[in-house]
Amino acid sequence: MGEWRARLLVIPLTFVGALILTVMPLPEALAPWRPEWLAMTVLYWTLALPRQVGVGTAWFLGLLLDVTQGALLGQHALALALIAWISLRLHQRVRFFPVWQQAVTVGALLALYLMLVLWVYGITGMAPGTWLYWAPLASSVLLWPPVFVTLRGIRRRWCLSVG
Amino acid sequence: MVVLSLVLMTVDHRHHHLQEVRSWLSSAVYPIQYVADLPVRLSAWTGEQFSTHQSLVAQNRALQEENLLLRSRMLRFEALESENTRLRELLDTAKRLREQVVIAQLLSVDLDPFRQQVVLDKGSRHQVYAGQPLINAAGVVGQVLEVHPLNSVALLISDPSHALPVQVNRTGLRTLAMGTGNPERLDLRFIPPSEDIRRGDIISTSGLGGRFPADYPVAQVTRVERPSGESFAQVEARPLARLDRSREVLLLWPAQPDQDPNTPAELAPPEDTEPPPEETGEPDTDEVIHG
């Protein structure tokens, strides 16, 4: 029973961890380079366990992200749900890519995600007028291998079955 | 999902019915923000616990000296204040009451790095209201944007969407201090090139617009340029309150005559954070005017 409950909690706990990392204070110079922790975690789980983490989960997490970031409700939710959907379509192929190739795919998805969020910022007239907006893309791609290995470790440790 | 998101965004942007949803979700996220802030709190606490006896003594002495100094100034201030009240009574104008303050801690969590917002650990339980002014020991910090039960989100005066009605202390010249997104810089707008304004001038709130009480220091002028052919001078100022460094702020309940300070919800007329060209009567500071 305990084992079961622990398994049910593992995935939500990784999302909570990602949210904490998202709001964790960083030094001024590093703040624009904060990786998209939550989007990366969502992408990992949609690739690894597509039956358990889907578009709905991604949408709800995006809503939480909107609230923490003071963005419009639905802004991150829309973008996150869309890339989760694409990654669900691709998971059969991407899962067998080597890690660096996965990182590139994840990078493309995150670029789409950032673009969607930027569009909404632009439509509502608060587009950040700096190239630093794209900095998280670089840091996320570079950090994908360690994130991937960590989450895979967590998945194997708790024997979460491949959907 | 896509349609739902679009509907949500439109509703959130145009109307403001979603406050409750946002408030509810925000309470759900508050523990996460609290946990993220813990390391900072812990390090401050351990720093306090393990500071040496000597440094504590030194700090104590410095504080006592400062206290003495402040008290002596306070004596003069009280005398001046009573004189002021007397004179105002003579002039038969409204009395100014003392403002009420409460100290709030900033949770050091990073919100969107392109907007200048902070999270406070006081919310509607502590009678915080949207539009409430925030100050610290050095000057004006910002105003409350959203209130949730246990916490609230505040907009700093350096946010690009924030405009603060101010005046130059030396000359009484009235202007607007617009945020730039840089916590070290404010732009002063609509100053004709012929006006007398110099580097080093202190600007303070003018009290126009009614949201911020008058005469709180805001910033110091750092640069004045009068490009030929432009109709306004370009003036920059540096906020006196170190916006990116303070951990504690004071929430201010501006006391106004004939109004009960315990129900401050209606105190703030909504229109003063919008700069004049974009004044649409929209009572929401969330709407960012990019300028």
Image (cartoon, rainbow, N blue to C red):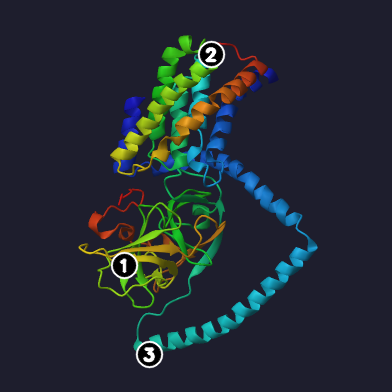
Dot 3 surroundings within 10 Å: few (below 14), some, or many (20 or more)? few
Badge 2: chain ID: A
Amino acid type at circle 1 is Thr
What is the spatial separation of the Cα atoms under label 2 and label 1, in whole angstroms? 60 Å
Which residue position is annotated with label 2?
A98
Please say if the residues under marks 1 and 3 sit with CB atoms less than 8 Å apart. Answer: no
Which residue position is annotated with label 3?
B90
Nearest-to-viewer mark from 2 and 1: 2
Residue A78 placement: quadrant:
top left
- Of residue B215 and residue A112, the one placed in the foreground of this image is A112
- Of residue B258 and residue B25, the one placed in the foreground of this image is B25
Residue B215 placement: quadrant:
bottom left
Quarter of the rendering occupied by the N terminus of chain A: top right
Quarter of the rendering occupied by the C terminus of chain A: top right
Instruction: Indicate the secondary structure of the residue bearing disc 3.
Output: helix
Identify the mark nearer the N-term, 1 or 3: 3
Amino acid type at circle 2 is Pro
Badge 3: chain ID: B
Say the numbered circle drawn on residue B216: none
What is the spatial separation of the Cα atoms under label 1 and label 3, in whole angstroms? 31 Å
Nearest-to-viewer mark from 3 and 2: 2
Amino acid type at circle 3 is Leu
Instruction: Indicate the secondary structure of the residue bearing disc 1.
Output: strand
Which residue position is annotated with label 1?
B175
User: Is residue A8 visible in this depiction of the protein?
Assistant: no
Dot 2 surroundings within 10 Å: few (below 14), some, or many (20 or more)? few
